[in-house]
Image (cartoon, coloured by chain):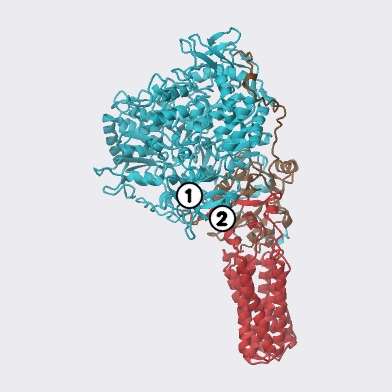
Chain colours: A brown, B cyan, C red
Amino acid sequence: MKLGLVIDLDVCVGCHGCAVACKQWNTSGTTGPLTDTDAYGAEPSGVWFNRIRSYEVGDYPHNKTVHFPMSCMHCEDAACVTVCPTGASWKRQEDGIVLVDQDKCMGCNLCSWACPYGARELDPASGTMKKCTLCIDRIYDERLPVEERQPACVLTCPAHARHFGDFDDPESDVSRLTRERSGYALMPEMGYKPTNKYLPPRQKRTVDTSDVARGGVRDKLKAWVNRVVAR
Amino acid sequence: MAGFEKIPDFAKELPQFEPRDKQQTHFTTCYMCACRCGIEVTVEDNKVRFIRGNRNHPVNRGVMCGKGNAGIMKQYSPAKLKGPLRRKPGSERGSGEFEEISWDEALNELTARLQKIRETDPKKLAFFTGRDQMQALTGLWATQFGTINWAAHGGFCSVNMAAAGLYMLGHAFWEFGDPDWDRTKYFMLWGVAEDHASNPIKIGLEKLKRNGGKFVAINPVRTGYQAIADEWVPIRPGTDGMLALSMVHVLLSRELVDFDFLIRYTNAPWLVVNTQGQKGDGLILRDENGKPLAWDLEKEAFVDATQAEIKPATFGEYTAPDGRPVRTVMTVLVEKYLDEQYAPENAAKICGVPAEQIERMALEIAHVAFKETITVDVEWTDWAGRKHDKFIGRPVSMHAMRGISAHSNGFQAARAIHLLQTLLGTIDCPGGFRAKAPYPKHVPPPIKPAREMAPNTPLKSPPLGFPTGPEDLVIDADGNPLRLDKAYSWDAPVAAHGMMHMVITNAVKGDPYPIDTLILFMANMAWNSTMNTKSVQEMLREKGDDGEYKIPYLVVSDAFHSEMVNFADLVLPDTTYLERYDTISLLDRPISEPDAICDSVRIPVLEPDRDVRSWQEVMVDLAGRLKFPAFTGEDGQPKFSGYKEFITQWEKAPGIGFLAGWRGKDGEKSLRGEPNPNQWEKYKENGAFFEYHLPESTRFYKFANKEYLELAKEAGFNGSSEPIIFELYSEALQKFRLAGQGLYDGPMPTREEDKERLTNWFDPLPIFYVPLEEQRIDTDKYTFHAVNQRPMLMYHSWDSQNAWLRQILAQNFLYMNRSRALKMGIEDGAWVWVESHNGKIRVQVKLMEGVQEDTVWTWNAIGKQGGAWGLSADAPEAARGFLMNHLISELLPPKEGSRDITNSDPITGQAAWYDLRVKITPAAPGETGSWPQFDTVKPLPGAKPSPSEVRHQSHEAVNLVRPIDDVLSRGAK
Amino acid sequence: MHPALSVIFFTVTSGAGYGLFILLALAHVFGIGDPLTVGEFYTAGILSLVMITAGLLSSTFHLANPKNAWRAVMRFRTSWLSREGVFAIAFYPFAVLYMLGFYINGLELGVPCILFALIGALIALITVFTTGMIYGSLKTIPQWSTSLTPANYILLGLASGATFFTAIRALAGSEVGTIAALAVALVAIAAIGKVIYYFWIGRESITINTATGFTRAVVRLLDTGHTCDTFLNREFGHTIDCAKVGLLRGVVYLLAFALPIILLAMIATQNGGSGLALLAAISIYLGTGVERWLFFAEAKHVVNLYHGRQSC
């Protein structure tokens, strides 16, 4: 299996729901807690697995705003795993999820250096690297209803801009969406074969007005004619 | 995908990550904003594990936004109040010196004070509430107390939106109506800054885009929802009304209107008296029974316009039996909007939107409405009993919010948008703008605001209502305001939500009269929920010659240590949303959907660990102590043991109570039925909400749908099942205008400026006018419009203390159009002075593409007073964040010969805080940090310092261990 | 990239230490220059081990969870950091045996001694190479992702080692013409390597457009999604302005290359004494420190593209 996410840039409105849901689930999850520092002070910071950046494409007034959530891409050829000296970082053979074994990590940061996507953040309290687990502690949980065996970010997304599934299965939603909407990977030139895919904004819809555009009466009021309509 | 139906074999070897045996799940309602999503809260050892959307809930269908997901950090905020507090005797108000007292002491003190007021002069109590959504209860409480000085925050939120809708359609944007997301093909979003409503709009926009619909966003700023629009219209703030009316002009000039709809469901064929300069001019021609008249084309006679089967003329001028000239509403309307002033070329100059674009958009909506018409093949019966085999849908829909409403021309602008919708026939039809129960109501809802007060006596009607003429104003015989906020006076005759923003100013000035006690619930009026923050703080501290505070007694109920709490004489600590019972009632602002009548509740999921009580509970307690009739039994003792019992037992009318679900003794009745003592349990079983699915035949055209209208009457939504007729032309407004012209039989203003305001702005048809502040200042000096937007991840001030959300946003910037700023020599990150007629602030600039060139904007309510909300003195919110509020005056700029007039919509009293005009100059080198700065709020007694490190965890993590042979044996992959 | 002092100290000091050891071993085994004295041998040998060890210890300060440092040898199969660890450890027995052999046999070169010396030197060279490869293998940092990176590490290690070796011998009063000449050559080659490197990193290939996939118009960051710094900003967000880069590169050219070459050349041509040799060693050590600081400071991690940087 090749589990991963599809993120639809056409509908993401930048609410940060996915990021906070992730924070919420994972702070009590398998690699939790996700430490926050200076929480009420001058430099509030903390460990997040998912961050949303916003970009503007083009110049005013032809600009478009794009909200861009980023988390671990669960690369097929994950450089973060390659460079890890301790073996704490690993990619599961069964489902392709990239994880950090919290008991093994020595906090050298090299994996975060190797990751082009900023997907890994060091927890200053535990001294270990933490990252998206694709909610491995949710997706296989038989005690959850079927619909909820999904990553917290996908479950919560109000715009349904996030989809979870198996890219090895050509019939899965994620495979189909990637195919139909020209899903693309970020920085493919790195050669890490990221599993997650991004759906580009759709083409703008145009509305044909030729069938209503006729007329343009300038001498208008006289042209109005009462029509008999029963109330 | 729906998740693994069959758990793969390999996954069965995974450890049990969650201690499920220690976890319980509870359903309740989110309160991280006003959207009211259903949530499921997983609790473990009285600690919150996870809050997720309730999959079955009608509002959010399982999803949740950034705010909702951060509920844990609200629950564990160090700023939570711990117990009742009293300002230390001898200390100055606002100095932050408090002493801890018991609830008994607090309530005894408050009861004694309130009792005295109620026995003598009930209006000396002013009770104003913030974003509470429990106005049915607070309003009832004020009514029972006998004070008309009550309102919620609608006066600076969205009254323009609500009132415009209710005076034209009987329903309105947001809580009263929704686009038909499933069917709409063209959606226009006007002035919506990422909220109102939060998740439903996100869910809807995705559906719209998936279905191939077009999304047009009209907003000077391109963030949030606007980001994903197919077309962004960067309009100049405060000119939306003109844009809508110009589109009306285009539609009318091409005859692109739905005549059948207009004739059947609107007052377009009604006849208007045309006797300029005479009494009665502009009123509707009526018969002796007060019925409006129309001209029947077949009968060639005047007929009762509300009858079925008449064939009324849409156009034409006639002579009434009494000899007065009359013409149809539609004639007046067409004549008005075909005027060249509304032509796209002229509108373009005002709105900053190219004429071709205005024309194209108008034609696009016309195309979708008339050439992409849809039908829903369901048989239904109209108000006159006629059967129809289908609902015809014109799949154009719209939604609007604060960008329209927070201007002094917002009421008319919102009406202009509704006019556009109505001309296309897109109201409550498939694909259009649908009503949500208990709306639509009759136009306007037949409730008049209370005027008379007497000691120890409840009011005869609620404090807020809908005037239909000057005789309904809440003024004395001399025309002076009776309400403290001057709502329903000549300042703002249709102030249907009150004018909370004027309360402190008026009370301190003693204009119209001084008060004794001000109770504020959940309203941060000493900071971001006020105009002119600094002077409001000064006013709260102001004393009279007698050494007494101008507002003698200030009671604040809040759950957190807000800036307002710092100014209280008595602090009543509220619970968090996870610790309380609450109702989101059909008597108030419910959670209904177009297809279902819904209400919901909050049920505590955690035991409070502090000495706090929910405000609902305190109100019911106080009502008993003060012996309000509705809360007192025949034995003279309090009737209800508490809020829970009050909710199930109290009836507004026989069978109608706060909750509509599971009524009747055994809970077998919906909407109406006798009280059910087990109602709360039923709600709990059902996931904390009630959903009554409307039969398919009642889902559309509710305003004229017999079956629905009868249901609405039975459910107590409407007093009668008469059809609801849309008032394109508002006779109520015309009555006020006549009063301004001195042509009315009834109360009339005496001051010139009042006459002028009524004459100019109370047009019975939607108009555009330049916002009032702009009319009084030098626009060559104050070249920029300045507006506030709410970020999607925070709601007012509620969550800047939230340890997670403030990591995302702890400092706001002044956003400027990049090329415009660079031309002024202002670089990204520069500090600038922003100056209005009312004051100046120093702020940091961020440049962006997505903002109209003449507009600057910022995120609302991010700036904080250091020390409040558990924040450190040097928190970014305090040191670099800012409030635009300092620049906004609650009064219009002074004008020769005019008294002080509220900076509000002249019709509804909606605070016009988006009218702000400013001048921007670079700060001197070295001038950094936001200004003005405020003293750091002192910690409350017994408060622990906020933690530096937060490591929330409901249970010890179960690490997934990588097998050692895997470590040693795996290759490069 | 954030220039972490512990890592800079580590790479500079242990690099020089390995270089010194290699020079010592080669000079010893192949009799380069005048015969070594016992004192020189001990000074050079012990100094090299001290520098290597101090560097390695310093590198552990960079670890957030050093109690797991021992696990770093586990992923030799793929991780250059792991390989570095393994070689760093493997170096010690050979170095110690070499020194021990010397202790037992004196300057007399036996076969085992030659073997230990050469294997030790080879491992030292490999260790410096693996250090370079830790950085050189990171495609995420275009300025590092080149074979010039390990080449620079090796050349600078050898150059500073040679300079140190020259200084030790000069201070001991030996004739150091040959070894100084060798040092001049090594410093010169290192300088050429570095010049090429600085030229090479001038180009920026990955842009915010390719990173986001929006290639048809200008892309600008509107919001990072956080107000204050995150781990990512602190680790990767370090920026340095052009003027400072120019200045510091000048310092590198001067201290790491020009001055040592001049001083060493003077020594090689019998125009200077031991003081100049010491000055050369101090100069190249400081110069390499600045070079290493710049190596990090000038490196632009591609994640910065997502934080608004236009190209990397």
Residue density around tag 2, few if under 14, some if 14–19, many if 20 or more, within 10 Å: some
Q: Is residue B591 visible?
A: no
Residue C40, percent from left and from top: 64, 88
Name the quarter where the C terminus of chain C is drawn: bottom right
Read off the residue under disc 2. Answer: B827
Q: Position of residue B313 (x, y in %)?
A: 59, 14
Q: Nearer the viewer, residue B434 or B48?
A: B434
Towards the viewer: A27 or B370? B370
**Quick check: can you spot residue B824?**
yes
Side of B84 where B886 appears, left or right: right
**Residue C219 horizontal/vertical position (percent):** 66, 51
Q: Residue furthest top?
A: B299
Position of residue B965 relative to residue B97, above or below, is below
Nearer to me, B880 or B895: B895
Query: Are labels 1 and 2 assigned to the same chain?
Result: yes
Q: Quadrant of the N terminus of chain C?
A: bottom right
Q: Residue at x 67, y 65 (%)?
A: C74
The CA distance from mark 1 to mark 2 is 15 Å
Amino acid tagged 2: Glu
Residue on which disc 1 sits: B834
Q: Amino acid at mark 1?
A: Val
Pointer 1 indicates a residue of which chain?
B
The numbered mark, 1 or 2, whose residue comes first in the sequence reads 2
Left or right of B662? Residue B487 is: left
Any mark on residue B117, and which? none
- Image quadrant in which you'd find residue B632: top left
Residue B764 at x, y = what percent? 50, 24
Give SS at disc 2: loop
